[in-house]
Amino acid sequence: MINFFVVGDILSAFKEVCGGHGRCDYSEALFLCIKRITSRSPHFQKRVVYLFTNDVQPFGNNRQHCIAACKNADDLRSHNAEFSVYPLIPEDHEQLDPNVQKNFENISELENDIPRKQYARRNIAGLDFEIGNGVKFSVGIIPRKQYARRNIAGLDFEIGNGVKFSVGIYALLGTEKLPQPIVLDAEENEIVQRSHTYINKETGDEMPLLDREIIRRRQVGGETVDMSPDEIDKLRRITLPGLLLLGFKPLSCLKISHHIRCSQFVYPLEKEVLGSTLMYRTLYEVCMKQKKMMICRYTQKANEEISSKFRYAGFHLVYLPYAEDKRDLSEQMTHPDGEWPKASKEQIEAARGFVKKLTASYFPEKFCNPVLQKHYKVIEALALDYAEMPEVKDQIQPYFVHDAFRKRVEKELDSYRTATLPDDYNPEEKKKKETKTKRTDDSSRFLKRKPESFELKRKVKDLRSSKIL
């Protein structure tokens, strides 16, 4: 690839390397895109076509060319593909003013394909038309990585008496995990290949064993059981795949502490079972009206691809802990001498004001995972051969670590301290008492030692000195 950016005249360099450029038949280009995405190989999970043009007359005076391009754009969208037009023309272009209507009258049919939020609004021939502000502004809004919406599992939702409908499970939010570490050779910087060799204890000979032939020990119900990999796999499959309705509970019974992992979205699959959308919508409306939630037993199965998009209000799967997994904190929450002292209204208001001042709007993109950020900084330092690793800013530290946050709540913190602590409270005096008590305990332990121990140590010391002499 020739670096055109270091060349003074980019157009001359492009002509020298590529032989110049010519006009494009957009209808033929869109037809080629349709042919590619409808072919069996390769298979595209996400189909997106972006058209970038800096030509103020992309179709010239050929009306038939414009009609054919618009028809192929509609055909492209009918094949579940996204199509957007990005006109890369700056506002100060000499051809935009005063002949804006003349320059763009031929592509007004593609107005719906132009992204609305990225461009300055113009009025052309009675239509609200939008023109790009430049290459830099347009490229910034294009998503660099797009995630296709594929369901994790497609399964049956049984509500009782053999009544079932089909639903798909989608993960809208998940935890980003660190990549698996790879062992590299320090000298050759190549991946180290690992192999396992099994040796007979009695004969010392190597035994070629397959993974299915190895017997593993597992703790089941407090007993150690020898199990094969097939038996371990069957033990994990307690029930058949699907969703089974167990009952209903009020929404007020669902606490934040019950969430043990990210929730998942449930969406009806009308293609699998007719009437699934109607059943799903009826359940959703009844639950919203009565403020109820459904308690289900969920067993996931293999992933099934689906191309339908969901923009739908519906249920979310929230993973709940089993009864034996919940911690019993009643003993820790019970006061040893009776009842806990009750806070006064003044103390409650002071605490409420302090918490309210610290409360801010939350969304996942606002806080970065410090472990992942440190991992990325290490990779960046190794790749770019930095002498020192760049500093990682931890955005989830408490308020008193940051000066700006601490100054923000100084007034509320003082009022809370005044309402809860006594007037003569001095934290420095408490620290001095703790230090003095520790020293007293050390001296008392020293005085409690028996005289015989000192006499024994003296004899051992004399014996060692005599041996040295």
Image (cartoon, helix red, strand yellow):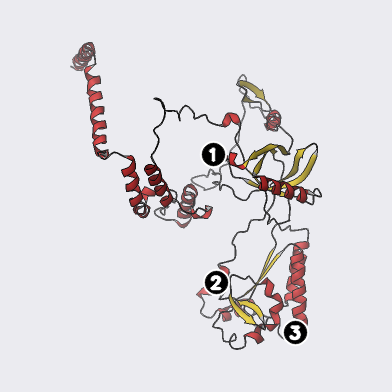
Say the numbered circle drawn on residue 257. 1
Residue at horizontal 65 percent and vertical 82 percent from the top: 124
212 or 27: nearer the eye?
27
Please, which residue is most extreme toward the front here? 345
Q: Which quadrant of the rendered structure holds the C terminus?
A: top left
Disc 2 crowd, CA 10 A, few/some/many (<14, 14-19, 20+): few
**Do residues under tags 3 and 1 come within 8 Å of each other at their CB atoms?**
no
The residue tagged with tag 2: helix, strand or loop?
helix
The residue tagged with tag 1: helix, strand or loop?
helix
Disc 3 crowd, CA 10 A, few/some/many (<14, 14-19, 20+): few
Find residue 198 and report its horizontal and vertical position in percent.
Answer: 62, 28
Q: Tell me: 439 left or right of 257.
A: left
Question: Can residue 398 be seen in this snapshot?
Answer: no
* Label located before the other in sequence (1 or 2): 2
Q: Distance of mark 1 from mark 2, alpha carbons? A: 44 Å
* Label located before the other in sequence (3 or 1): 3
User: Which callout, 3 or 1, points to the residue nearer the camera?
Assistant: 1
The amino acid marked with disc number 2 is Phe
Q: Which residue was labeled with disc 2?
A: 137
Say the numbered circle drawn on residue 62. 3
Residue at horizontal 62 percent and vertical 78 percent from the top: 54
Find residue 220 and report its horizontal and vertical position in percent.
Answer: 63, 24
The amino acid marked with disc number 3 is Asn
Q: Tell me: 373 left or right of 422.
A: right
Q: Tell me: 407 left or right of 223.
A: left
284 or 190: nearer the eye?
284
The amino acid marked with disc number 1 is Ser
Quarter of image, res 255: top right
Q: Which quadrant of the rendered structure holds the N terminus?
A: bottom right
Residue at horizontal 74 percent and vertical 43 percent from the top: 155
Q: How many marks?
A: 3
